Image (tube, rainbow, N blue to C red):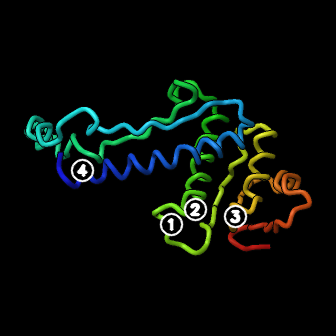
Amino acid sequence: MTPLAEYIYQKRSEFIERFIPIFQSVYNEIAGGNEQVSLRYISQLQDRNLPEAFVRTRQRDLILGWTSQGVHKDELEMLLGDYPLKRVGSQGQQKTYLLAMKLAQALYLSTDSPVHQFTDSPILLLDDIFDKLDSERVERIISLVRSERFGQIFITDTDRQHLTNLLGNTDARIFHVEKGVIQ
């Protein structure tokens, strides 16, 4: 394995190990603790000698015009229970999963993790997040993002009344934008 590939693989493995508990916690808050989720880091470096793989596939890679081996082929497998999310998850579960990943990333950057280099929390931009979600999940999301764990948040929704009802008596400010002008 090349030193750079080994370094990337190690750092990604360390990140996933720290990130998974944060992600699972956020997902459980949104889903009400009724579903088990996880992430699995999959890398070619787990099961092969990279320099040998480069030699073995070099001719084919030259013809194809790209490298078929290496850390650029790494993946995150998204699991619901023991099964791939894309195969067994409903649209609402898939949306919850992705939203939980984004919120967990914001929390990860806001904590004392080694990558934390900022004095402020990240600004969250959540575009049309309520589609495909049941009312309980929507309420839990609003409650979660209103907590002190998150900084400034922008939420867009095409249904003004829906957003007004969701936010109720909060300190949120609602802006109506029409043809690029804030009203």
Q: Position of residue 26 (x, y in %)?
A: 65, 46
**Which is more N-terminal, label 1 or label 2?**
2
**Which is more N-terminal, label 4 or label 1?**
4
Between disc 4 and disc 2, the foreground one is 2
Query: What residue would you read off at disc 1?
Result: 116
Pointer 1: residues within 10 angstroms few (<14), some, or many (20+)?
A: few
Query: What residue would you read off at disc 3?
Result: 153
Label 1 to label 3: alpha-carbon separation: 19 Å
Report the residue at 68% width, 39% height from top: 28
Image quadrant where one finds the C terminus = bottom right
**Amino acid type at image mark 3:** Ile
Image quadrant where one finds the N terminus = top left
**Amino acid type at image mark 2:** Thr
**Which is more N-terminal, label 3 or label 2?**
2
**Amino acid type at image mark 4:** Ala
Can you tell which mark lies on residue 5?
4
Describe the element under mark 3 as helix, strand or loop. strand
Residue 32 relative to residue 51: left or right: right
Residue 51 relative to residue 149: left or right: left
Q: Position of residue 146 (x, y in %)?
A: 77, 59
Question: Residue 164 versus residue 21: which sits nearer the camera?
Answer: 21
Marks 1 and 4 close (CB-CB < 8 Å): no
